[in-house]
Amino acid sequence: MTAFDLARPTHRALVDLVVDPECAAELKSRAVRWPSWTLSRRQLCDLGLLASGAFSPLASFLGQNDYLAVCGSMRLADGTLWPMPVTLDVTAHAFGTTAGQDRLALRDREGVLVAVLERTQMWRPDRHAEAGQVFGTTDDSHPGVNHVLHATHDWYVSGRLSVLSQPELPEHGVLTLTPRQVRAEFARRGWDRVVAFQTRNPLHRAHQQLTLRAAREADARLLIHPVVGIGKPGDVAVRTRVRCYRAIMPSYPDGTAMLSLLPLAMRMGGPREALWHALIRGNYGATHFIVGRDHASPGADAHGRPFYAPYEAQDLLAAHDTELEVKIVPFRRMVYRPDTDSYCADDEVPPGTVTRTISGTELRQRLAAGRALPTWFTPPAVAAELRRCYPAPAHRGLTVFFTGLSGAGKSTIANHLCASLEDRYGRNVTLLDGDVIRQHLSADLGFGRRDREENLRRVAFVAGEVTRHRGVAVCATIAPYAGIRADIRRTVEQYGGFVLVYVATPLDECERRDRKGLYAKARAGLLPQFTGVSDDFDEPEDADIVIDTQVQSPAAAADSIIEHLGRLGYLPTRSKSGEC
């Protein structure tokens, strides 16, 4: 008898928060009098999994006692194992100013009412403490920490949750099955032993061989259950990944595997997240769960140090084995052996044997450069889908993002660049100038740090959409903070290229040139939080191009950017006019 032979007992009953049509109609009629909250994508994902029972035994967003217990001990206040806080963050004024108003209409991004929260608690958490306890670090280069510290509102709210309908995430399609639907499908197929596989990446040959081997060892069928909610910034776009999953499924033996998508917002929490994933897959009816190397890890910090040890997740799940409804199937990294044309675990390779792997970084580099993916690494059908998403650089979208002090010359250079890209190379260019964006897209925002970052997120969204549709976005903003610039790079690089241009004009020169009189107002205290005077500017250490406008004219600076884009392959060798 192997370690994988015994399936777990019957799975727990599932929570169901979706109200009946009559109740939904009544809530909808009454909700017009209640304050509304537009749910973020992460909040929509969490709400959907709460509603369907995927987060059972949770019946709402965590209350304060459960939240503190989960952060501190990976358990709810009653002792139930639950490692990840699932909270609803809002602003202080979410419930409006009317006394006694305790109901909040939760709406999706289109304004559709999806749920009602009847408040029982509202508190201001210590988010630094939360980050340290949950992720083991307060380093905001960790995406989970970054979200908690910089993208989470100051107040958490909990209470009775009534869901009118499952939030719609249309890009996921019919493959997004609820826990009840997955359990029913297992029953229809006669599957009583199922090993679930978690991923946020396309499946390549190593993944496929790992899953087939796990199924054999567990004497079970396979649930390929990739995350399609929110993964790590820079991941392959969801629609592309889903096409890749569809492409690889026919290569599994008949009757051995099924595909279902999981609209989970990952936290990239390493060992804690792996434990969370196991609990969720138990709710979907799986009896076994694969835990591999670096499970749910965000990788390394800014100094190259991994946030978590490679097999730390396996150790944590082994320590809680008796409390889980699924048995853990641990696996080491799979490597390719050219001598046998096969895959095996790295600890099974005979000494001196040559092996091959392609890291995620190398994969992205190959795709970005238009290089072929070897068939030993990925099936041709998957490679073809990835190539659709990553055309040759000259046919790909691009964002050129300027940063620098007010008056540095960003807008002037950007205008020269736009003219060159349009007139000489025929590229479709969208100029996103900081002043214009403030007037038309962010007129509601102030100039405090949070509002500045929100303004830049809006710029990033537009730039990402332009890039996704294979245009060129040229952004001329101050963008003073390193963290938000890194977020913008990650956002845009999901869709195409990103080039950061630092216009490094010194402060005294910017002040000398000041045509708008802004620096004088700032020095007089009339403009608080003015970059370079009363607010910080983080000089970029990751700029792709640095421009000194004291020695380069705007036209020459634009030409230097054109040359750089040409070297990267984003422009043809010859321009429309025939110039080299």
Image (tube, grey):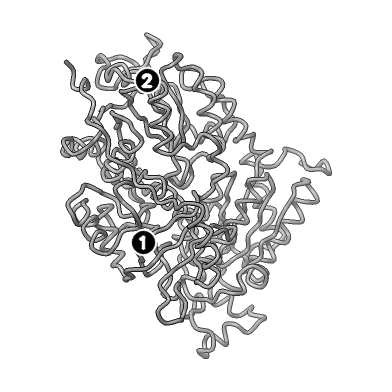
Q: Nearer the viewer, residue 192 or 196?
A: 192
Residue 295 position, x and y percent, is 32, 37
Q: Nearer the viewer, residue 24 or 415?
A: 24
Q: Nearer the viewer, residue 452 or 567?
A: 452
Residue 184 position, x and y percent, is 41, 30
State the SS at label 1.
strand
Q: Are marks 1 and 2 in contact (CB under 8 Å)?
A: no
Residue 455 image-quadrant placement:
bottom right
Q: What residue would you read off at disc 2?
A: 190
Above or below — where is 269 with respect to 512? above
Residue 547 visible to an observer of this rendering: no
State the SS at label 2.
loop
Above or below — where is 23 with respect to 518? above
Farthest residue toward the top? 340
Residue 21 position, x and y percent, is 51, 52
Q: Indicate which disc residue 160 carries.
A: 1
Above or below — where is 510 with respect to 150? below
Q: Amino acid at mark 1?
A: Arg
Residue 384 position, x and y percent, is 59, 25
For the point 63% across and 80% down, the residue is 514
Q: Nearer the viewer, residue 397 or 252?
A: 252
Q: Amino acid at mark 2?
A: Gly
Farthest residue toward the front? 22
For marks 1 and 2 on the same chain, the one whose residue lies earlier in the sequence = 1
